[in-house]
Structure formats: structure tokens, C-alpha cells
Image (cartoon, rainbow, N blue to C red):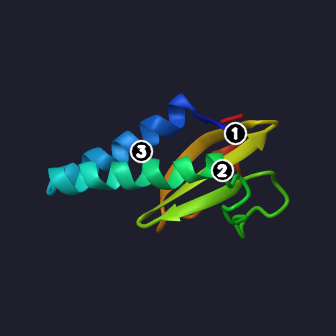
Amino acid sequence: MDRLIWTEPALNDLEAIAEYIALDKPDAARRYVRRVFEAVERLTHFPKSGSVPPEIPHLPYRQVVIPPCRVFYRTEGQDILIVFVMRSERSLREDDLLERN
């Protein structure tokens, strides 16, 4: 089993998204965060199960889509680094990921 590591910026991203959802629906925000953690936890058994983001096929990142968000990660040996979480309706820029290395 691989080791899952959430970076501080990625946790902050998820927290900001949850806080926005919680403005109207606090219970939905809690459920959503649980869904994200459950979906990402599966990567410890299947690290290549995420798709390659179509905007950046030349970079070593994969994504897990948990609507309304995309969770981006990369692997380093036995480590799975969660580096960025964004709302799906936003456009992904290569710099969004590269600045988090």
C-alpha cells in the first residue's frame, strides 16, 4: 500500500471549497469532504486509477474528479502527493500545479 500525503495548500483548497458550500448547507459540506477523503484514499491501493488531466498530458499529474471538484496528485516512489483541489468549472492552468512543487 502506498502512502497518501495531503499537502497544506491542497488541504486549504478543500477547506475553502467546503466553507463555501457550508454557507448554505453545512451538512452537505461535511458529507462532501468525507466523499473527497474516501475517493482519494482509494489511491493508496490504485495510484494510477486517476485520469490524466487533458490540459496537461505532458506533466506527471493525475486527477480524481469528485463533482464539483477535481483533485490533482502525483506519485513519488511509494508516496501519493495531493497537491491541488479546484472547482471543476474553473480552467486549469499549468502554473496552478507547477507552483505547488
User: Which residue is denoted by mark 2 in the rendering?
Assistant: 45
The answer to whether the residue labelled 3 contacts the one labelled 1, judged by CB atoms less than 8 Å apart, is: no
- Numbered label attached to residue 76: none
Quarter holding the C terminus is top right
Query: In this picture, is 95 found above or below 64?
Result: above
Residue drawn at 47 percent across, 68 percent down:
89
Residue 52: where, in percent of width, then height? 73, 64
* Residue sitting farthest toward the top: 8
- Label 2 – label 1 distance at C-alpha: 7 Å
- State the image quarter where residue 53 is shown: bottom right
Report the side of 83 relative to 61 (left or right): left
* Few, some or many residues within 10 Å of mark 2 (<14, 14–19, 20+): few
Q: Nearer the viewer, mark 3 or mark 1?
A: 1
Q: Where is residue 3? Give x, y as percent.
A: 65, 34
From the viewer's side, name the closer residue of 8 and 76. Answer: 76
Front of the two marks 3 and 2: 2
Per the image, the residue denoted by label 1 is 2
Judging from the image, what secondary structure is the residue with disc 1 in?
A: loop
Secondary structure at numbered mark 3: helix
42 horizontally vs 11: left or right? right
Q: Position of residue 19 (x, y in %)?
A: 26, 45
**How far is the residue under mark 3 from the one under mark 2?**
22 Å
Asked if 49 appears above or below 2 in the picture, the reply is: below
Task: Report the amino acid beneath label 3.
Answer: Leu
Residue identified by numbered label 3: 14
Does the CB distance between marks 3 and 2 fall below 8 Å?
A: no
> Furthest residue to the right?
58
Count of marks placed on residues: 3
| Measured Cα–Cα span from mark 3 to mark 1 | 22 Å
